Amino acid sequence: MGIIESSFPQAAVIITGDFNRLNISHLKCQFQLKQLINFPTRGEATLDLILTNLKHFYQVPTRLAPFGLSDHYTISLIPKERKKTISTKKTVTVRDMRSSKKQAFGRFLHSVEWIILESMSNIDMKATYFNDIIQIGLNTLMPTKSVKLHSNDAPWMTGHLKLLICQRQKALNEKNTHLFRFYRNKVNGERKLCREKYYQVKVKRLKNQNPKKWWNECKRLCGMCNPKKDILAKLLPEEAMTAKRGNDLKPKGT
């Protein structure tokens, strides 16, 4: 199982068979598997089990008559009807909020001759001049850019990670084993970095502020619950955090 998990991260797993009296608690805990059979399969004993990480994709197992001369009941496991999901995309406008950009914007503001404002008697002219200066600095040093978000994307997904995944899949389709392994390792490493950045920026502070929400976010990072549908919450630091933070620097009334 460890080899399978390392070679095929997030792969679907189904383990079935006659487990007899084998203790499977460590297997379920380590690989986050669910045991689906809750009825006897031979006499009064539950020996035949189904372990999987796809519990939500299957109906409740049913017990049927033994097959042939077997003294074990037959188990029927039927997948649920697949619902067609509507995939939505949204484009938002954000600014580059990296520390280097903020520092450059600060130096720009420091270099402006603000004394000119004192010579203006009209308050509207002062506000217009101030807004123009801010906009010039923002558009020059921290220009806006459009980011496409997909409703089904993981919250830590970035454009660079998507590119690596595409390159990995292309190598797999072309049966280029060496290149596939190279990009597989790149994807795994980049995904870990993206999750770490997401945790540091959006989750870590919740541990003291809202422990319940912090724990829910941790479970989401570990793949233990369904992702949120809030598409604006899916921007990462390298993509200007969120559209809201990018707009916070935009003067009101513009």
Image (cartoon, rainbow, N blue to C red):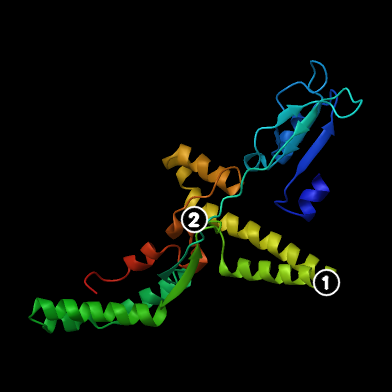
> What element does badge 2 sit on?
helix
Up-down relation of residue 222 to residue 40 (above or below): below
Residue 19: image quadrant is: top right
143 or 162, nearer to the observer: 162
Residue sitting at 84 percent across and 70 percent down? 178
Residues packed near mark 2 inside 10 Å, few (<14), some (14 to 19) or many (20 plus): few
Residue sitting at 67 percent across and 43 percent down? 79
172 or 154, nearer to the observer: 172
Up-down relation of residue 17 to residue 144 (above or below): above
- Apparent side of residue 162 relative to residue 150 in the rendered image (left or right): right
Where is residue 143? Give x, y as percent: 41, 78
Type of amino acid under label 1: Asn
- The quarter of the rendered structure image containing the N terminus is top right
Residue sitting at 76 percent across and 42 percent down? 14
- How many badges with numbers are in the image? 2
Residue sitting at 77 percent across and 70 percent down? 173
Q: Which residue is mark 1?
A: 176
Q: Which residue is mark 2?
A: 201
> What element does badge 1 sit on?
loop
- The quarter of the rendered structure image containing the C terminus is bottom left
The residues tagged by marks 1 and 2 sit, at their Cα atoms, a distance apart of 37 Å
Q: Mark number for residue 49?
A: none
Type of amino acid under label 2: Val
Where is residue 114? Give x, y as percent: 22, 80
165 or 199, nearer to the observer: 165
Where is residue 12? Give x, y as percent: 72, 48
Residues packed near mark 1 inside 10 Å, few (<14), some (14 to 19) or many (20 plus): few
Residue 75: image quadrant is: top right
